[in-house]
Amino acid sequence: MNRLDGKVCVVTGAASGIGKRIAEVYAARGGKVVIADLKLEAAETVAQAIRGVGGDALAVAMDVTDEVQVVTGIEKAIEHYGQVDVLVSNAGIQIVNRITDFSLADWKKMLAIHLDGAFLTTRECMRDMQKRNTGGAIIYMGSVHSHLASKLKAPYVTAKHGLLGLCRVVAKEGGEYGIRANVICPGFVRTPLVEKQIPEQAKEFGISEDDVVKNVMLKDTVDGEFTTVDDVANVALTLAAFETNALTGQSIVVSHGWFMQ
Ligand code: NAD
């Protein structure tokens, strides 16, 4: 059974959706979890619920695009738990628009959250992992959009493809320290991020919300099913608990066969 006993796991964007479930699953398998999120109150609620069932969790306020907040947040995690063993760089948002209608501000906001956030959290956690030289796991929340493109999602697709590159460099630089890096690439998961897109895409494409789900989001899956937060959390658990460098620099697609590599 995959166990994380005593491992300190920082999960960004863990106040909601996929990140929240990963934090819960990690805690249930013995991990000490740091719930790092823009929304401190919601992060505190998740941490309290984990502590309420006997787990160990700390909520930390962190805007992953802000260097000072990332540095301070990881420092707080290390102050509290002594180290960082696992980073799940998961915080993300979605903004959909046609390229011709995208503002530069929205483009920069998307790249900042998905790429600057991944870089800054990686740098701070890797510094601690390398200093202690006890290995570690870094997991990026990519997407099927790390491998293919959809209309209306230029910055999201660009950023999610970019995470593959960052992951591979981290895998190479981390190798000698036993630091593994991998990307999880989920298909559509029914979280607030996706719920918001259904009416937006219906409006943009001029189709019903039902058609967005059936004929846009799940059209190419093998069974017309959404991926679940549990599906993604179980893969994140395996990647965090895996013990050797045999599994590094990879992307694992969890999408009901939407994308097959
Ligand atoms: P969600 O909206 O449920 O949760 C995202 C969390 O990130 C929220 O708690 C939010 O407060 C936090 N966040 C946003 N901006 C932040 C910032 N600057 N700093 C710190 N925290 C911030 O979304 P989700 O669906 O759980 O998405 C999580 C990740 O999974 C994202 O990277 C997303 O791109 C990726 N993903 C989601 C799906 C899907 O279908 N839901 C599919 C593939 C990949």
Image (cartoon, rainbow, N blue to C red):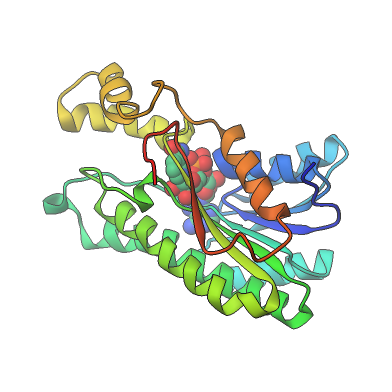
Say above or below: 162 vs 190.
below
Q: Which residue of the protein is positioned furthest toward the right in this rendering?
A: 54
Image spot of residue 225 (x, y percent) = 44, 23
Q: Nearer the viewer, residue 145 or 18?
A: 145
Q: Nearer the viewer, residue 71 or 165?
A: 165
The percent coordinates of residue 13 (x first, y second) are 56, 50
Residue 210, quarter of the rendered image: top left
Q: Residue furthest left?
A: 100
Q: Position of residue 41 (x, y in %)?
A: 65, 45
Locate residue 78: give its quadrant.
bottom right
| Front in this rendered view, residue 38 or 7 | 7
Q: Is residue 59 visible?
A: no
Q: Residue at x 16, y 52 (%)?
A: 99
Where is residue 7? Give x, y as percent: 80, 58
Q: Nearer the viewer, residue 209 or 73?
A: 209
- Residue positioned most to the front: 246
- Residue drawn at x 23%, y 26% is 202
Q: Is residue 162 left or right of residue 128?
A: left
Q: Is residue 45 left or right of residue 186?
A: right
- The correct choice, above or below, for 259 with respect to 221 in the image is below
